[in-house]
Image (spheres, grey):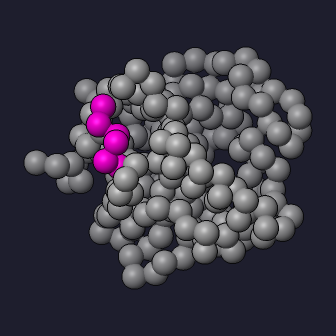
Amino acid sequence: MDTAKYFQEFPVLESKRLVLRGIKSEDGKDLYKYYSDEEVTQYMNINSLDREEEARKLIEKMQGRYEKEEILPWGITFKGEDRLIGTCYLSDFSMGSMATLSYDLSKRHWNVGIMTESLKLIASFAFYQLGLHRIQSFVHPENIASIELLEKLDFTNEGYLRQYQYHYGEKDFRNVFIFSLLKKDFECESICPA
């Protein structure tokens, strides 16, 4: 796995309509707008945000983890607009061959293929640039939209992990499904390198 250069110069990914770029402190206002919506955060391990300052602190935390080479956090924007509408990130790099995928999206942009497009870009980058063998994602059992998204992208549901994920707002543990995608099962269509 070759991550070193991507922690020196952040990898910008593009599709026909999206740009996935590094998260900036200026994204705080946009992140707050959708992280203050309980429908967006209900399956995440945080409560919805009450103040814009909380969003800025989350961004600082992500940037700090990037500097420590723990996470690659992308902000999702439309081409020609630099307004944050969602995030995707790879973290928990393991044994040079695996990473965990996490993502979220503003409710205003649900059900129009944005996350499908974003995750295809991330998977292509993970498999063909980083040289990963496996990507995994943890999903709350009631998050049907996320389950359907991962299944659409050929992720396999590997099982149910009891009380696996700690929810800081509820101060309790949650059950999750674990999904994975192997490089050999990834169909990248037109976005893969030649």
Does 135 sit above or below residue 69? above
Placement of the N terminus among the 4 image quadrants: top left
* Depth check, front residue: 153 or 18: 18
The boundaries of the magenta stretch are 1-6
User: Which residue corresponds to the image point at 38% horizontal and 76% vertical from the top-left?
Assistant: 79
- In this view of the protein, can residue 148 be seen by the observer? no
The question of residue 158 being in magenta is answered with: no
**Residue 117 as seen in the image, left or right of residue 35:** left
User: Which residue corresponds to the image point at 40% horizontal and 21% vertical from the top-left?
Assistant: 95
- In this view of the protein, can residue 105 be seen by the observer? yes
* Depth check, front residue: 174 or 116: 174
**Residue 48 coordinates in the image, percent (x, y):** 81, 56
**Residue 89 as seen in the image, left or right of residue 142:** left
**Residue 138 as seen in the image, left or right of residue 32:** left
* Depth check, front residue: 194 or 27: 27
Does 47 sit above or below residue 165? below
Q: Which quadrant would residue 146 be assigned to in this image?
A: top right
**Residue 120 as seen in the image, left or right of residue 104:** left
User: Which residue corresponds to the image point at 37% horizontal and 53% vertical from the top-left?
Assistant: 8
